[in-house]
Image (spheres, grey):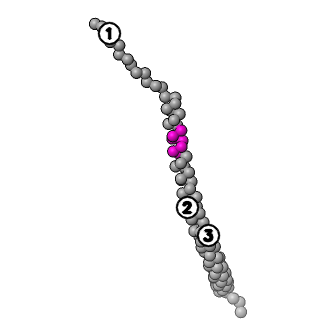
Amino acid sequence: MVMDVNAFLTILLLIAGVVLLVVLIVLGIKCIGILNKVDKMVDDVNGKLESVDGVFGAIDKVTDGISVVADSIVTNAVGMIGKAFKKKKKKKKYEEEDF
């Protein structure tokens, strides 16, 4: 018996569809496994960052304090230098003239 070309192509397409479906299912399962591993890794990194966050907060407060002290020192120094080089105003003496 000779198989019809249409029947042969239909069977070939069905076999290719089944193979493609199986490959996609396997790839989907592998992707789910990879995403679970990535999720665990991200959770681990977030936990480590939260533990270090307190240290960064303390460092931020210290640098802010140092900045405030440095700004006040610079402001006072500039004020003193400005006073030292400031031109003194001359007092005008009014002379009494006889009219």
Residue furthest bottom as drawn = 1
Q: Which residue is mark 2?
A: 57
Residue 32 pos. (x, y %) = 62, 79
Local secondary structure at mark 2: helix
Q: Which residue is mark 3?
A: 48
N-term mark: 2 or 3: 3
Front residue of this view, candidates 49 and 90: 90
Q: Which residue is mark 1?
A: 97
**Residue visible at 35% across and 16% down in the picture:** 94
Q: Quadrant of residue 21?
A: bottom right
Local secondary structure at mark 3: helix
Front residue of this view, candidates 97 and 13: 97
Cα separation, mark 2 vs mark 3, equals: 15 Å
Q: Is residue 21 above or below residue 91?
A: below
Residue 2 appears in view? yes
Residue 42 pos. (x, y %) = 61, 71
